[in-house]
Image (cartoon, helix red, strand yellow):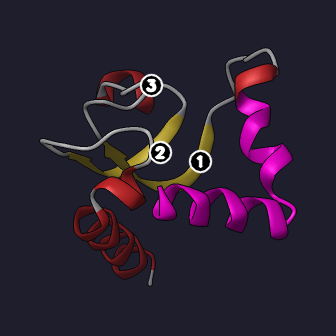
Amino acid sequence: MDELLTWVTAHWVTGTIGTSLATYAEPATPPRRIGTPTVLSVFPRDTKPEPRSYAESFLNVVDYAEHPAGGHFAAWEQPGAYAGDVRRAVALGG
């Protein structure tokens, strides 16, 4: 419970609670193709785990990682895997 309250408080006090909830309330429209090199992490219990083929129709996917565990709150649920993907993205970009 303490960890949940920490995450909610972090969103609230930083003023990001509204934008964090917007994706659940606003209608989704498919984006135009985004050319920025993208590293995509997929966690099986996410609300919309994307197959690589689908993601590549919208994104310039340069790396794609499917993880065996984790969900919508991957940074919280699988911090090691998530951090590893962020490190890999930074290394690929620089």
Horizontal side of 89 relative to 1 (left or right) equals left
Provide the major secondary structure of the magenta segment: helix
Residue 76: image quadrant is bottom left
Name the foreground residue: 60 vs 7: 7
Cα gap from disc 2 to disc 1, whole angstroms: 5 Å
Q: Is residue 12 magenta?
A: yes
Residue at 51 percent of width and 39 percent of height: 59
Q: Which mark is residue 35?
A: 1
Q: Which mark is residue 47?
A: 3
Residue 71, relative to residue 93: is it above or below?
above
What secondary structure is found at the residue carrying circle 1?
strand
Q: Position of residue 34 (x, y in %)?
A: 63, 42
Foreground: disc 2 or disc 3: 3
**Do the numbered discs 2 and 1 sit on residues whose CB atoms are within 8 Å?**
yes
- Image quarter in which the C terminus is found: bottom left
Q: Position of residue 9 (x, y in %)?
A: 71, 64
Q: Earlier in the sequence, mark 2 or mark 3?
A: 3
Cα gap from disc 3 to disc 1, whole angstroms: 24 Å
Residue 80: image quadrant is bottom left
Residue at 42 percent of width and 32 percent of height: 56
What secondary structure is found at the residue carrying circle 2?
strand
Amino acid type at image mark 1: Gly
**Do the numbered discs 3 and 1 sit on residues whose CB atoms are within 8 Å?**
no
Cα gap from disc 2 to disc 3, whole angstroms: 22 Å
| Residue ID for mark 2 | 60
Horizontal side of 46 relative to 43 (left or right) equals right
